[in-house]
């Protein structure tokens, strides 16, 4: 029993972990009604082409304000929803909303503006996933190429046949596949040649400028013919450093924090020169 208690294995009883457990249960309970109560919303952060400062796409990021008025971040509730299985319904809601927003911008003239959607590895195991996405796209008559699917490097499970099949189905469908938080995983890089990923997103933890890890990943991306997005660009120095290395795209507070769709201007151009 005590052996399997994870971090607290040498403590028969731990107040802190009991509190954490209660918090998790509380979140699971509150998540049950979150969709029906309209407690979720999406905010959008631009992906900027570093060469000219134009916006090429946006990333949809989930926000949750509970009935009690508490704001809980995705870094906290997504892992809990993954464990409880609730991520499937939540993920479907995100998929639907983000595609709908992409369609609204598409119809407003941003015909090349793509939408990046974060997808949990648990959703990839759902055999209905790619069918569900393609149904949404058909209904909206939206080109699949405008949808970018972000999967975190840490969650890639190459042994899971269903997940691998879903990735290939998505690629066949014409969506782009992005490897999120790249550089933070400890997996063997050989999956890069077996799985149909198009883009690497360098994790924001590597972002202080002059970082050799960031420049090495960019060079590797060029070799592998993959596009690179650097996340977490907060300073002009960092932006210029990445632009010089021919990193194609960037995201970060320097350009814009994630905002609701109503505050997002797809035609905006950023200029730092
Ligand atoms: P991510 O996909 O890697 O998203 C990047 C995170 O960095 C976002 O945090 C974003 O707000 C933040 N960020 C953007 N620019 C900067 C910057 O310049 N500096 C810093 N320090 N941070 C920046 P957020 O919105 O809290 O999301 C955290 C994570 O939660 C995401 O990481 C993603 O893994 C997950 N997530 C968010 N929305 C969804 C969703 O709809 N579905 C799933 N499955 N996961 C989601
Ligand atoms: Mg992401
Ligand atoms: Mg990331
Ligand atoms: Mg992340």
Image (cartoon, rainbow, N blue to C red):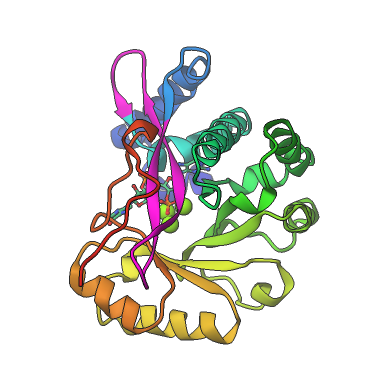
Residue nearest the observer in this picture, 22 or 271: 271
* Picture quarter with the C terminus: bottom left
**Which picture quadrant has residue 69?**
top left
Residue nearest the observer in this picture, 198 or 11: 198
Q: Position of residue 183 (x, y in %)?
A: 46, 71
Q: Is residue 103 left or right of residue 64?
A: right
**Residue range (magenta):** 42-71
Q: Is residue 16 above or below residue 113?
A: above
**Which picture quadrant has residue 73?**
top left
Residue nearest the observer in this picture, 125 or 55: 55
Q: Position of residue 25 (x, y in %)?
A: 45, 24
- The reply to whether the magenta stretch includes residue 57 is yes
Q: Position of residue 71 (x, y in %)?
A: 30, 27
Residue in the image at 72% along x and 55% along y: 174
- The reply to whether the magenta stretch includes residue 135 is no
Q: Position of residue 187 (x, y in %)?
A: 58, 71
Q: Is residue 171 left or right of residue 1?
A: right
Residue in the image at 27% along x and 79% along y: 241
Residue in the image at 62% along x and 32% along y: 92
């Amino acid at each position: 029993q005590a052996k399997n208690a994870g971090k607290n294995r040498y403590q028969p009883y731990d107040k802190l972990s009991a509190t954490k457990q209660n918090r998790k249960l509380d979140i699971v309970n509150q998540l049950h009604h979150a969709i029906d109560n309209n407690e979720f919303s999406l905010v959008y952060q631009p992906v900027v082409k570093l060469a000219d400062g134009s916006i090429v796409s946006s990333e949809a990021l989930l926000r949750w304000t509970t009935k009690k008025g508490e704001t809980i971040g995705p870094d906290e509730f997504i892992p809990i929803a993954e464990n409880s299985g609730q991520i499937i319904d939540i993920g479907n809601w995100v998929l639907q909303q983000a595609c709908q927003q992409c369609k609204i911008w598409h119809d407003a003239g941003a015909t090349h503006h793509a939408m990046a959607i974060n997808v949990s590895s648990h959703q990839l195991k759902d055999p209905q996933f790619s069918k569900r996405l393609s149904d949404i796209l058909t209904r909206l008559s939206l080109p699949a190429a405008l949808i970018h699917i972000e999967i975190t490097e840490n969650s890639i499970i190459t042994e899971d046949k269903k997940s691998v099949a879903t990735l290939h189905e998505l690629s066949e469908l014409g969506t782009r596949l992005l490897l999120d938080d790249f550089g933070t995983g400890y997996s063997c890089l050989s999956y890069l040649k077996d799985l149909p990923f198009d883009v690497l997103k360098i994790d924001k933890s590597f972002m202080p400028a002059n970082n050799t890890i960031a420049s090495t990943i960019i060079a590797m991306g060029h070799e592998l013919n993959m596009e690179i997005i650097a996340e977490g660009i907060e300073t002009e120095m960092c932006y210029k450093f990445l632009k010089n290395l021919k990193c194609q795209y960037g995201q970060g507070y320097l350009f814009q924090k994630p905002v609701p769709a109503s505050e997002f201007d797809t035609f905006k151009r950023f200029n730092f020169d």
